Image (tube, rainbow, N blue to C red):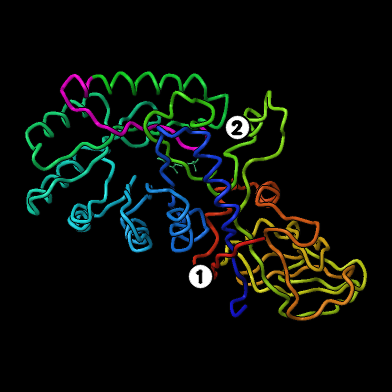
């Protein structure tokens, strides 16, 4: 380990998740792997070739920059879809590379058409409908305008998809709102089809919706968190297991994060540890310094709360989390040495630190914990036996 810490990606677990989700969605539903936010912290360059190898051929990202990272990581013919940000100056490259993208307002449509005309090729678009989340997308009025613009420019526009995003399918409390969104979506779809535009890819579901609302699967599901082995929420997890005899979790976490002991120190009873006065040694203790901190994605809210694994023991993080370092209490761990393995997320002997444990103590979503993992941390792919 030359870096202070390493994130390992377990290929076998990734393969299991892909297989499970493909089977669950059925063969008529395309799975688009959502790899935004550096593939939920796992590393676009490491994850994308693995997904490709295990049969995923559709990728969703937020921005142009992410799309290009996916583009260069792929080896065969695949579809890349940008759901969010493209600077105008990047639009020609997007169109030339055949990358698909969401049209969420009229301005975006006009920019796309202008560049498609200049290049004399068709832009591949997904019309995004505003169905009730009130974040992005065309409302009914704007959809009508978009339809007439598309009609006038059909030599330059290929309407591949019609989509929307549901505002919180992972929670039952949002059920009425989601139902209303699905109804609005279908209404807008029929308007589109009545004007003789028939997108072949209709999609609305993320991980949670694809489980909770099977009807929402349509032609494609945009799955992020579950491909990485996490349930969107406890509610989705419980709903899945309801009425199932087998309570074995079909999803496997694929990421682990390990570091090493950088330095060991004895601290006398009555001394404070790290910045300020948040941790006072109640006895003579032994501490280990670990080279990860909030700059690596280890939240400062884990100060005096986090747990790491050393030699198969749970060790508490004491004092505040620093920018690049944390300190763990190793008083009860026998024969520790500088260089010994420290598990931040993952397994060691019989123990495991889960992202969920992590997020529970620091009040973060698992999405958030993952997205914060610094891109500077080395990622490596491993195949466990
Ligand atoms: C992030 C995102 C998804 C994936 O959500 P998960 O809960 O991770 O499956 C799907 N669709 C859109 C528009 C997104 O932004």
Q: Secondary structure at mark 2?
A: helix
Neighbor class of circle 2 (other Cα within 10 Å; few <14, some 14-19, many 20+) is some
Asked if the stretch drawn in magenta spans residue 193, the answer is yes
257 drawn magenta? no
> Where does the image place residue 363, in percent across and percent down from the top left?
65, 46
Query: What span is colored magenta in the figure?
Result: 191-208
Task: From the image, state whether disc 1 or disc 2 is nearer to you.
Answer: 2
Residue occupying the point 64% across, 34% down = 237
Quadrant for the N terminus in the image:
bottom right
List the residue tagged with mark 2.
236
At 60% from the left and 62% from the top, the residue drawn is 383
Front-lying residue, 86 or 19: 19
Left or right: where 91 falls relative to 219: left
Q: Secondary structure at mark 1?
A: loop
Q: Which mark is residue 376?
A: 1
204 sits left or right of 335 in the view = left
For ligand 1, give the image quadrant.
Answer: top left
Residue 292 sits in which quadrant?
bottom right
The vertical placement of 157 against 120, above or below, is above
Left-right relation of 219 to 283: left
| Left or right of residue 50: residue 99 | left
User: Is 143 in front, or is 207?
Assistant: 207
Residue 302: x %, y % from top left? 69, 57
Image quarter (top left, top right, bottom left or bottom right) of the C terminus: bottom right
Asked whether the residues under the numbered discs 1 and 2 touch, taking CB atoms below 8 Å apart as contact, a structural biologist would say: no
Q: Is residue 29 above or below residue 337?
A: above
Residue at 71%, 64% (x, y): give it.
343
Vertical position of residue 265 compared to residue 134: above or below? below
The CA span between labels 1 and 2 is: 32 Å
- Which residue is found at the position 22% from the left and 56% from the top? 97
Give the camera-side residue of 337 and 379. Answer: 379
């Amino acid at each position: 380990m030359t870096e202070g810490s390493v994130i390992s990606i377990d290929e076998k677990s990734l393969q299991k998740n892909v297989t499970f989700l493909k089977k669950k969605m059925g063969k008529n539903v395309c799975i688009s792997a959502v790899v935004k936010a550096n593939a939920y912290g796992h590393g676009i360059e490491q994850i994308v070739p693995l997904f490709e190898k295990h049969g995923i051929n559709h990728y969703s990202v937020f921005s142009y920059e992410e799309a290009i990272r996916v583009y260069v990581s792929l080896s065969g013919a695949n579809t890349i879809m940008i759901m969010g940000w493209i600077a105008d100056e990047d639009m020609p490259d997007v169109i030339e590379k055949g990358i698909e993208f969401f049209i969420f307002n009229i301005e975006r449509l006009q920019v796309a058409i202008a560049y498609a005309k200049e290049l004399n090729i068709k832009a591949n678009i997904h019309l995004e409908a505003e169905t009730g989340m009130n974040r992005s997308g065309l409302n009914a009025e704007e959809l009508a305008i978009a339809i007439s613009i598309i009609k006038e420019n059909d030599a330059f526009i290929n309407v591949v998809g019609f989509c929307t995003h549901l505002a919180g399918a992972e929670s039952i409390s949002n059920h009425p709102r989601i139902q209303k969104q699905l109804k609005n979506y279908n209404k807008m779809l029929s308007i589109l089809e009545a004007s003789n535009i028939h997108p072949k890819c209709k999609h609305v579901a993320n991980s949670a919706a694809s489980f909770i609302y099977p009807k929402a699967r349509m032609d494609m599901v945009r799955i992020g968190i579950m491909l990485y082995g996490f349930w969107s929420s406890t509610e989705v997890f419980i709903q899945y297991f309801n009425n199932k005899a087998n309570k074995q979790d079909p999803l496997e976490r694929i990421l682990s994060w390990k570091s090493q002991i950088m330095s060991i120190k004895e601290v006398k009873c009555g001394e404070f540890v790290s910045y300020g006065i948040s941790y006072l040694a109640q006895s003579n203790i032994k501490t280990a310094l670990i080279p990860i901190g909030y700059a690596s994605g280890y939240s400062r809210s884990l100060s005096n709360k986090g747990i790491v694994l050393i030699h198969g023991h749970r060790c508490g993080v004491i004092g505040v989390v620093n920018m690049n370092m944390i300190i763990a209490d190793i008083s009860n761990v026998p024969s520790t040495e500088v260089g010994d393995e420290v598990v931040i997320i993952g397994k060691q002997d019989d123990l495991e630190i889960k992202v969920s444990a992590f997020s529970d103590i620091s009040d973060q979503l698992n999405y958030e914990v993952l997205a914060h993992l610094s891109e500077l941390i080395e990622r490596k792919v491993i195949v466990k036996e």
